[in-house]
Amino acid sequence: QKEVEQDPGPLSVPEGAIVSLNCTYSNSAFQYFMWYRQYSRKGPELLMYTYSSGNKEDGRFTAQVDKSSKYISLFIRDSQPSDSATYLCATRSNTGNQFYFGTGTSLTVIP
Amino acid sequence: DTGVSQNPRHKITKRGQNVTFRCDPISEHNRLYWYRQTLGQGPEFLTYFQNEAQLEKSRLLSDRFSAERPKGSFSTLEIQRTEQGDSAMYLCASTGVGSRVTGELFFGEGSRLTVL
């Protein structure tokens, strides 16, 4: 079983829509959860970071972790064409040595 | 902070040839990671260094792959006797003691390998 599972999509939405991206993880000991955004032919860049359960908001982006169900979510409000990218969920070991990535969800926001 | 730099950005080679990629991490970062990414997949862990010590290597990594980080600065990833299945994007990332709290990996732009 992979450490992180993610629906690969692709996902296509109209501009202004609310986008929901989801992942599950396998190890209940994981505490740190991240979302990376990757534009085509570029390296991933950190978008959001959360520790343990709860929500974290940054502008139009909200990251949510539900440890009881081992579920990670990213919500994008008022989606823009510039949000079109692949979104990778990730977690890391508590020692900080190992990072585990989902397969990525490809998002296209249509103007 | 000039970010993580990788060279070359794209390498086309014939099957059986050797290739080497270089990564220059953010200067104050002591940890350096190599990942491989194929189309439609997330980054797959290959190996990581803390300073000059290679602390972990993926069990999936063939003996044809070797990585070094002399003096704990830049790192090289060499692939010997390349095969078509090696075609992928090779990503380097670094993180430092300060970044450990946020868990942020800083990625380079990647080196794309095409094996003909």
Image (spheres, helix red, strand yellow):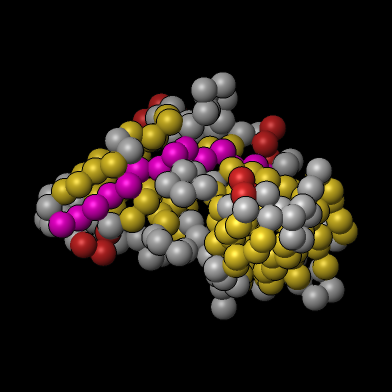
Residue B70 image-quadrant placement: top left
Which residue is pictured at 83% across the width and 68% down the height? A66
Asked whether the viewer can see residue B91, the reply is: no
Name the outermost residue toward the top: B1
Which residue is pictured at 85% across the width and 60% down the height? A53
Examine the rendered structure and indicate whether residue B89 appears above or below residue B107: below
Write the start and end of the magenta stretch as one range: B103-116
Examine the rendered structure and indicate whether residue A83 appears above or below residue B38: above
Examine the rendered structure and indicate whether residue A53 appears above or below residue B47: below
Residue A1 image position (x, y, % from top left): 57, 78
Q: Between A96 and A86, which is closer to the camera in this rendering? A: A86
Asked whether the viewer can see residue B18, the reply is: yes
Please state if B110 lies on the left or on the right of A32 as rendered: left
Residue B13 image position (x, y, % from top left): 16, 48
Residue A51 image position (x, y, % from top left): 80, 52
Name the outermost residue toward the bottom: A1
Residue A31 image-quadrant placement: bottom right
The number of discs equals 0
Which residue is pictured at 65% across the width and 63% down the height? A13
Residue B63 image position (x, y, % from top left): 27, 58
Name the outermost residue toward the front: A111
Q: Is residue B77 magenta?
A: no
Which residue is pictured at 70% across the width and 68% down the height? A22
